[in-house]
Image (spheres, grey):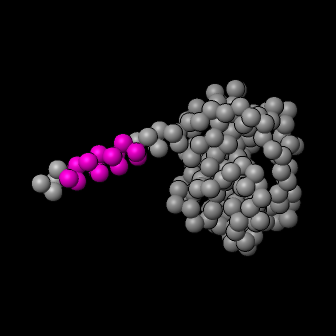
Amino acid sequence: MKMRWLGGPVALALVLNLFFLGSCGAAPQTKEAQDFTLSTPEGRTVTLSAYKGKKNVIVMFWKTNGLYCPFELNNLKERYPGLQKEGFEVLAVNKKEASAKVKGFAEKEGLPFPVLLDEDGKVCDTYDIGGIPVFLIINKEGMITWRGYRFPERYAELAGS
């Protein structure tokens, strides 16, 4: 009798998991990206609007202790040369961690793209970032064309490239 009772909750958990995984995969959007200026751990500033009209931008919100963040950062690191050739820039926005911690992590991992500090969380709040990682694809016109929790295989198509 216990097996029958467990079947319902297990089946419900499986259905909910599939539902949420599916919703995380691709969420097309078309709204204007809010501009921001953030610093790197080295003190250089990067402004999102500087890429408008020039490059598509992949923004990844992350933390050093995020469960999937190291995996996704490594994925972006491996793909970065190809992404640049296709007209993309990657901005890795760290969510509310100390500069020294982020700098050490980025150096250890050899991250080749700009790593930015959102120490007070204002940019994360602007983009309604709760759980991480979160990816945004912002096209050359400054419009968010996709938001999700995993880096998409069809990123160029999602940006309209």
Q: Residue at x 87, y 43 (%)?
A: 50
Q: Which region shows up in magenta?
A: 5-17
Q: Return the x and y of residue 57 as percentages of the image width and height.
A: 74, 40
Q: Residue at x 82, y 66 (%)?
A: 42
Q: Quadrant of the C terminus?
A: top right
Q: Return the x and y of residue 24 as percentages of the image width and height.
A: 53, 42
Number of callouts: 0
Residue 77 seen anywhere in this rendered image of the structure: no
Q: Is residue 8 magenta?
A: yes
Q: Quadrant of the N terminus?
A: bottom left
Q: Return the x and y of residue 109 as percentages of the image width and height.
A: 62, 62
What is the quadrant of residue 49 in the picture?
Answer: top right
**From this viewpoint, which residue is outermost toward the left?**
1
- Magenta span dominant secondary structure: helix
Residue 9 falls left or right of residue 99: left
What is the quadrant of residue 51 in the picture?
Answer: top right
Q: Residue at x 65, y 36 (%)?
A: 146
Residue 141 seen anywhere in this rendered image of the structure: yes
